[in-house]
Amino acid sequence: MSGPPPIVGADVSGSALKIIRLRLKPAAEKAVRSGHPWVYADSVREQSADGMNSDLAVVYDRADRFLAAGIYDPDSPIRVRIVHVGKPRPIDRKFWADRMRAAIGSREPLFDAGTTGYRLINGESDGFPGFVLDRYDGVQVLKLYTAAWFPRLPEMLELVGVATDDRPLVLRLARNLQAVAEAGYGLRDGQILCGGEIAEKIVFRENGLRFHADVVKGQKTGFFLDQRDNRRRVGTLAAGRHVLNCFSFSGGFSLYAARGGAASVSDLDISRHALDAAQANFELNHDISEVAGCGHRLIQGNAFDWLKSTVEARFDLLVLDPPSLAKKKADREGAAKAYRQLSAAGIRRLRKDGILVSASCSAHIGRDEFFDLVVGTARDSGRRFHEIGREGHAPDHPATFPEAAYLKCAYLQFEG
Ligand code: SAH
């Protein structure tokens, strides 16, 4: 491929990026040395010049030796996102190309033809901070969480094109970037950056099941790929059970349960749109006899209220997968209480031998804290139970630092 691909309607040619030198406070220096990729604004002790968006920030240690290099973002509390620690080296096209090849190549052995939706680049943990690239069958979705990539977009898109055979690519932007993207760079959330027209809903496969991904407008990049392995596990636990999937979104857990031989599945979500998507996903899989034969019910409602008020309802397998309940540190206490309430209400809805699958995607609630909280709630219920698993995210979502390991999923079975 010669030269960067055309970027429709965008102005990201950018001005030349400079290099600035930084020194950090001791705690931040230590964190960076041990591999943490975020440098907060209040950890910067001194810097050689005012940084512009996307400048290369070279970090020196107390002894004035090279420590790390990162990308500068003057408008984010995370002022520098580290991309390299150790010996000095150029952060050039080869650096990014090698890194991209390594990330994308590492996914190849993970999936067969039955799975065509997965993460190719998982942000910081693959060396591309705030840069997520997902594949949905023939389409790529790039989601950016920092404006620092905007000036580098032509180069990055060229590298993505080389690594993925120039498949069409949709740009998705974190909500807080959307205004600056449009005003400063002519970039819009949901814009098709390369490859012309694409369908709004892409059909892809996950472990042999078909799903729609709303890559242009849907949450995250269109689907919750991180829960793939938990969905599969739920499929293996579902035979003969009546299943309630709370916070169902587009019915992912339910479809696995139905294929796994569930007696019935109910999707409960507050959003009509999510339930319509769940219905459409069931229809997509009607050629699978277990799916076609499984009673599928849609319940629109607030899961917290529904679980509290429907005192008669009983299930044999109940999935709780709420959206993040702690968006910031200050929400932690409220979130812990909400997880406890949800788990307690879920346990009350379970029949004898029933299984509770309780997940948390809140980065501010730690792994041990969450599992302790779910197990503690199970103990408080007075019912006899045993743990059957503690899981996290699927392997295409590697996590190299604590904040990246946000997904936790507890499996408990209640014998009494
Ligand atoms: N389990 C899903 C992902 C869940 S995303 C999967 O595997 O794909 C979280 C879902 O919770 C969203 O669909 C959102 O609409 C829904 N939601 C948010 N608040 C809710 C509430 N109070 N009650 C019920 N659903 C809610």
Image (tube, grey):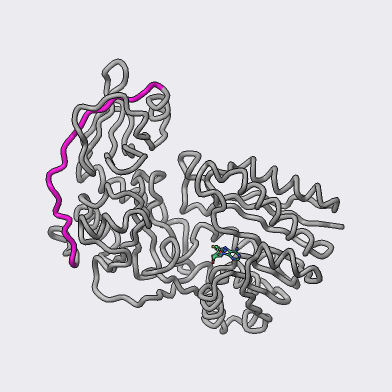
Question: Horizontal and vertical percent for residue 388?
Answer: 72, 52
Instruction: Write the residue at 56% across / 84% down.
Output: 287
Seen in the picture, residue 111 relative to 61 is either above or below; the reply is: below
Image label count = 0
Q: Nearer the viewer, residue 143 or 293?
A: 143
Q: Quadrant of the C terminus?
A: bottom right
Q: Provide the residue span drawn in magenta.
A: 9-26
Image position of 64 (left or right of 220)? left
The image position of residue 261, as x and y in percent, is: 69, 74
Above or below, comparing residue 279 to residue 409 in the picture: below
Does the stretch in magenta take in 11? yes
**Prevailing secondary structure class for the magenta stretch in the rendered image:** loop
Residue furthest top in the image: 63
- 114 relative position to 343: left or right: left
Q: Nearer the viewer, residue 11 or 253?
A: 11
Residue 173 vertical position relative to residue 368 in the rendered view, above or below = below
Q: Is residue 210 left or right of residue 269?
A: left
Q: Is residue 153 magenta?
A: no
Q: Quadrant of residue 343?
A: bottom right
Q: Residue at x 36, y 51 (%)?
A: 145
Where does ligand 1 appear, by image quarter?
Answer: bottom right
The image shows residue 122, relative to residue 260, as above or below, that is above
Quadrant containing the N terminus is bottom left
Rendered location of residue 174, percent (x, y): 37, 56
Among the 4 quarters of the image, the one containing residue 270: bottom right
Tell me which residue sits at (66%, 79%) in the image.
297
Question: Measuring 38% from the left and 63% from the top, which residue is drawn there?
Answer: 135
